[in-house]
Image: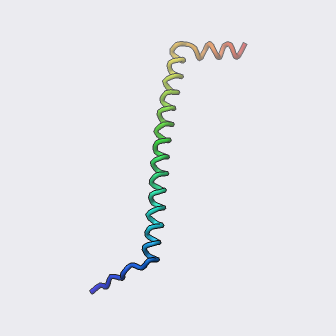
Amino acid sequence: MVKIKSSSNTDKKKQSTIVETLEELKENCIEIEINYKKKLEDLEDLKKSILQKAFAGELTKQLIIENV
């Protein structure tokens, strides 16, 4: 038969500390995920903008002006 050790105050404090740490890590992960998604959206917008300028011939005009 397995005996279950009763939790002491020290064990409960350790558990509370671990839970708090995990909650902070979870919040950090959520914040990182939000920032990551925002960066992906920004990159997609930049890509669209560059492609639009390229098809409109605006990028080559800028290169010609800079090389003159």
Residue 51: x and y in percent read: 51, 21
Q: Quadrant of residue 4?
A: bottom left
Quadrant of the snapshot with the C terminus: top right
Residue 4 versus residue 64 in the image, above or below: below
Could you tell me which residue is drawn at 44 percent across and 76 percent down?
11
Residue 42 versus residue 15 in the image, above or below: above
Which residue is situated farthest in the right direction here?
Answer: 68
Tell which of 12 and 51 is nearer to you.
Answer: 12
Tell which of 46 and 31 is nearer to you.
Answer: 31
Could you tell me which residue is drawn at 66 percent across and 13 percent down?
64
Q: Is residue 26 left or right of residue 63?
A: left
Identify the colour scheme used: rainbow
Residue 48 versus residue 6 in the image, above or below: above
Tell which of 19 and 46 is nearer to you.
Answer: 19
Could you tell me which residue is drawn at 31 percent across and 85 percent down?
3
Quadrant of the snapshot with the N terminus: bottom left
Which residue is situated farthest in the left direction here?
Answer: 1
Q: Is residue 53 left or right of residue 4?
A: right
Which residue is situated farthest in the bottom direction here?
Answer: 1
Residue 32 versus residue 64 in the image, above or below: below
Q: Quadrant of residue 53?
A: top right
Could you tell me which residue is drawn at 45 percent across and 48 percent down?
30
